[in-house]
Amino acid sequence: MIPPDLSVVILNYNGRRWLPRCLESLRRQTLADRMEVILADNASQDGSDRLAQELIAGWPAARFVQNGGNFGYCEGNNLGARGARGRYLLFLNNDTYLAPDCLELLVAAMDRRQAGAASPQILNYQDGALQGYGRSGFDLFGYYSNQGDEAGVPRDLFIAPGCAYAIRTELFQALGGFDRELFMYVDETDLSWRVWIAGERVITVPEAKLYHWGAGASAPSTAEGPARFRTTEFSRFHTNRNALLTLLKNTEHLLLGVLVPMQLLSLLAESLFMLAVTRRPGFVWNAYGKALLGCWRLRHHVLSERRRIARFRQHGDLWMLRFARPVPERLLEVLRLFRQGLPSVDAATPPSPRAGA
């Protein structure tokens, strides 16, 4: 049997609201006869696991995988990708739908440009406005930036977005897949670092159109649009911890010695600011203090990963400086504060595959 060109892995957790449109758009793909769909469920509690099985019933190219627990975005997707037969993998959020030719254009571009990983153009689910492409580089603090982006221009990306992350299957396996210790958040950043380190490319394919709600796993069912400027202890803890872990794992010497201390200073300043505006010491400790403790507790994992990554590293820190960007990303977020006001801090939410940051 000839293997498919593409295996689409959809990780689901309580995604009843999103699955019908997502799966229907996959059925309508011009690549439908050359792809398989794997729907991996992280022990959903809203009946969406049963709904998923009903929606793919009679679809020979689709199958359902029950992971048996909530393993987060990282390990949940790793489990879903086991046994995938396609030349490429596409890790697709359930709060998406695709233009009919999206996947055909995506695969064709990856073949033509010999890319290891790629992303389509990401548009808003509601109105079709541009949502983003991923990230083009990093700043002095190790945060990730879109500075210098040109809309609609095919180009290399530093980081492909996690809502629609395509990667060559053999490369994903060689890189070790998603790091299960991250659980969720910053997972696409960590994987993209490893793609570049291994001597491969990450590209954007703007002619391939995909529509993404954003924060689909946690958006209220009555919401008119995705929640924008809000945060939770859960999301801030994982984002802060995982951003540091990504640098500790993937940088060599120069960037390790510059970006990690600068990011630690940034986190200290941000934690003091959040303490002043929220007056919630518990939130600051859980979101920032515990993030640093979490890095320390995973120090043996970091050392093991650094040794493993060194075995396939093709590009070092000096080469990676081509992705450095001059303007601090946090400065842009400060300007955002003046436009939109302070972020709201929601109550802690239970872990989900891709909750709103």
Image (cartoon, rainbow, N blue to C red):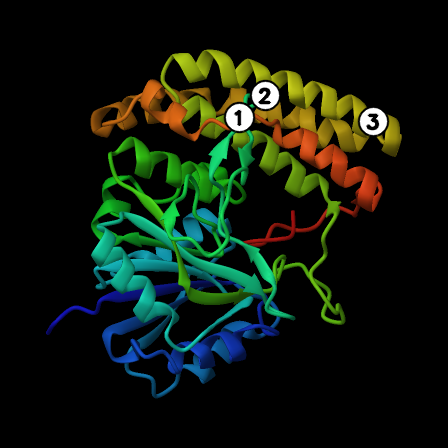
Q: Nearer the viewer, residue 58 or 263?
A: 263
- Compared to residue 185, the image places residue 165 above or below, namely below
Residue 93 image offset from top left, x and y in percent: 49, 61
Point 65% across, 52% down: residue = 356
Point 50% across, 13% down: residue = 258
Q: How far is the residue under mark 2 from the one under mark 3? A: 18 Å
Q: How far is the residue under mark 3 from the one under mark 1? A: 23 Å
Quarter-of-image position of residue 272: top right
- Callout 1: few (<14), some (14-19), or many (20+) C-alpha neighbours within 10 Å? many
Secondary element at image label 3: helix
Instruction: Determine which residue is flagged by label 3.
Output: 275
Three-letter code for the amino acid on which mark 3 is drawn: Leu
Q: Is residue 42 visible?
A: no
Tag on residue 10?
Answer: none
Residue 165 image offset from top left, x and y in percent: 40, 54
Instruction: Determine which residue is flagged by label 2.
Output: 263
Instruction: Determine which residue is flagged by label 1.
Output: 142
Nearer-N-terminus badge (3/1): 1
Residue 300 is left or right of residue 147, and the answer is left
